[in-house]
C-alpha cells in the first residue's frame, strides 16, 4: 500500500489534492478493504476525510488505527449520535482541501487507477464539472460481477446532453462513481440540499444542476466496485417504492431547472421520463415476484398503470396481469418465463453517448 509518500502536498500544480470523503455507519466489516483501496491509488496526492455516524460496530476503532498509521493524510470525525448521512458528509467536507473530491461509500472499493484517470481527464478538460466512471458489482462475499458501461465509449459529454439523459435514466447508481471539481460542487451543492435533501436523491439533483452549467468526463472502464448487500439504501428504497416515486418527483424538478437555463430539449423529455418510469415499475415488479414478494410486486404493477395508462398495451403488462389470476403452478410458469427475460432484471446494453460527445 505504501507506494508513494504519505503526505498531502499543498500547492502541487501537476498533482492537485484529491479529497476522498469516506462516510460510514456500521460498515466495519467492509471498511478496511475500502480504505486499503484508497491507499493503493496510483495518484500521488490524496487526503482521506473520514466521518462515522455513531457506529455500534468496530468502525471507529478501525478508523483510528488508519489515522494513527497515516496521520499526514487522514482526518477523522465521529458523531455522538446518528445524525444521518447529510451530517456525516458535512463532517467530511469540514476537513476537505482538495481541488477534486469523491463521496466514497465505506463499503465500496476503488480500482488503483480510479483517481489517476479521472483527475488527468479533468485536468485536460477544465471546462468539465465532474468525471464519472463505470462500476462493477461486488457482493457481501466479495464475488464480482460485471455490468455493461452505460455509454459504449469514454468521452467528454456536453452538459445539456447529459442533463437530457438524466431526465430518463440514473446513469450513475452509486455516488462513489463521481470525482467532482470541488469549487463547482460548492456552487451547486447548497441549492441541491435546500431543494431536495434526501439521502437517496440529493446527489442526483446536484449532478443534474452541474450538467446545466458544465460538460463532464465519462470513463467506460469499471474503476469502482460497488457493494450490493441487504443493508444498501437503494435496496431498502426499492422496497418502499421510493426508487420510482423519487425519480418521478426529480424529473419534474429537473424540467423546472432546465427551463430556467433555456434547455427546452431537456424539458421536452418529461413525458418520456414518465413512460420510462412506468416501464421500470414492471421491471421492479418482476424482481419482487421472482423473490417471492407478491405484495410489493403488485404495488409496482399498479403503479406502472398509474404513471402511464398506455403501459396496459405492452405485452409484459399483460403477462404480469395474468399472474394475479393464476394458480400456483401457472404462477411458477410465468415466473420462469420472466426469469429468462434477462433485460427485465438488469441492463444488458450500452448506449451511444449524447450528440456532440468527443472521445477521450
Image (cartoon, rainbow, N blue to C red):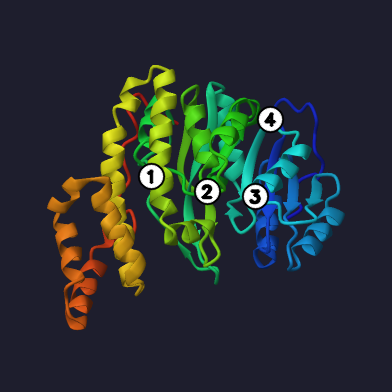
In the image, taking residue 314 as reference, residue 282 lies left or right, namely right
Identified at 83% across, 58% down, the residue is: 64
Q: Secondary structure at mark 4?
A: loop
The residue identified by callout 1 is 150
The spot of residue 218 in percent (x, y) is 46, 36
In the depicted structure, whether residue 194 falls above or below residue 201: above
Q: Is residue 165 above or below residue 48?
A: above
Answer few, some or many: residues within 10 Å of disc 2's Cα (few below 14, many 20 plus, some between 14 and 19).
some
Are dots 3 and 4 in contact, CB under 8 Å?
no
- Residue 193 pos. (x, y %): 59, 36
Q: Nearer the viewer, mark 2 or mark 4?
A: 2
Could you tell me which secondary element the residue under label 3 belongs to? helix
For disc 3, the marked residue is: 85
Residue 120 appears at what percent x and percent y? 59, 32
Q: State the residue position of label 2.
A: 200
Crowd around label 3: few <14 · some 14–19 · many ≥20 (10 Å): some
Q: Is residue 116 above or below residue 183?
A: below
Mark 2 vs 1, N-terminal side: 1
What's the distance in space between the residues labelled 3 and 2, CA to CA?
10 Å
Q: CA distance from mark 1 to mark 3?
A: 27 Å
In this rendering, position of residue 294 left or right of residue 59? left
Q: Which residue is mark 4?
A: 99
The CA span between labels 2 and 4 is: 25 Å
Marks 3 and 2, the one that precedes in the sequence: 3
What is the x, y in percent for residue 15?
70, 32
Residue drawn at point x = 43 percent, y = 46 percent: 246
Q: Quadrant of residue 231?
A: bottom right
Q: Earlier in the sequence, mark 1 or mark 3?
A: 3
Is residue 348 something that shows in the picture?
A: no
Distance Cα–Cα, label 3 vs label 4: 23 Å
Amino acid at each position: 500500500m505504501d507506494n508513494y509518500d504519505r503526505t498531502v502536498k499543498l500547492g502541487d500544480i501537476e498533482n492537485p489534492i484529491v479529497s476522498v470523503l469516506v462516510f460510514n455507519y456500521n460498515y466495519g466489516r467492509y471498511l478496511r478493504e475500502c480504505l486499503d483501496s484508497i491507499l493503493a491509488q496510483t495518484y500521488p496526492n490524496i487526503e482521506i476525510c473520514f466521518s462515522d455516524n455513531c457506529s455500534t460496530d468496530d468502525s471507529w476503532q478501525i478508523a483510528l488505527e488508519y489515522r494513527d498509521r497515516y496521520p499526514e493524510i487522514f482526518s477523522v470525525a465521529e458523531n455522538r449520535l446518528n445524525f444521518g448521512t447529510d451530517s456525516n458528509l458535512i463532517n467530511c467536507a469540514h476537513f476537505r482541501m482538495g481541488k477534486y473530491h469523491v463521496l466514497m461509500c465505506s463499503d465500496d472499493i476503488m480500482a488503483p487507477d480510479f483517481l489517476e484517470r479521472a483527475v488527468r481527464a479533468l485536468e485536460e478538460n477544465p471546462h468539465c464539472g465532474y468525471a464519472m466512471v463505470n462500476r462493477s458489482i461486488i457482493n457481501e462475499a466479495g464475488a464480482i460481477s460485471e455490468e455493461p458501461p452505460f455509454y459504449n465509449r469514454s468521452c467528454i459529454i456536453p452538459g445539456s446532453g447529459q442533463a437530457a439523459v438524466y431526465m430518463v435514466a440514473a446513469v450513475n447508481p452509486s455516488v462513489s462513481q463521481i470525482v467532482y471539481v470541488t469549487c463547482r460542487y460548492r456552487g451547486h451543492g447548497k441549492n441541491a440540499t435546500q431543494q431536495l435533501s434526501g439521502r437517496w436523491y440529493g446527489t442526483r439533483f446536484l449532478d443534474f444542476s452541474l450538467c446545466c452549467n458544465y460538460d463532464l468526463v465519462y470513463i467506460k472502464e469499471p474503476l469502482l466496485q460497488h457493494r450490493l448487500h441487504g443493508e444498501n439504501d437503494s435496496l431498502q428504497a426499492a422496497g418502499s417504492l421510493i426508487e420510482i416515486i423519487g425519480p418521478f418527483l426529480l424529473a419534474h424538478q429537473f424540467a423546472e431547472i432546465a427551463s430556467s437555463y433555456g434547455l427546452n430539449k431537456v424539458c421536452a423529455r418529461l413525458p418520456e421520463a414518465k413512460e420510462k418510469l412506468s416501464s421500470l415499475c414492471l421491471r421492479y415488479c418482476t424482481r419482487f415476484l421472482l423473490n417471492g414478494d407478491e405484495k410489493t410486486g403488485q404495488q409496482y404493477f399498479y403503479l406502472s398503470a398509474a404513471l402511464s395508462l398506455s403501459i396496459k398495451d405492452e405485452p409484459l403488462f399483460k403477462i404480469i396481469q395474468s399472474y394475479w389470476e393464476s394458480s400456483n403452478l401457472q404462477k411458477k410458469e410465468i415466473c420462469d418465463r420472466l426469469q429468462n427475460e434477462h433485460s427485465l432484471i438488469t441492463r444488458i446494453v450500452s448506449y451511444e453517448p449524447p450528440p456532440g460527445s468527443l472521445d477521450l
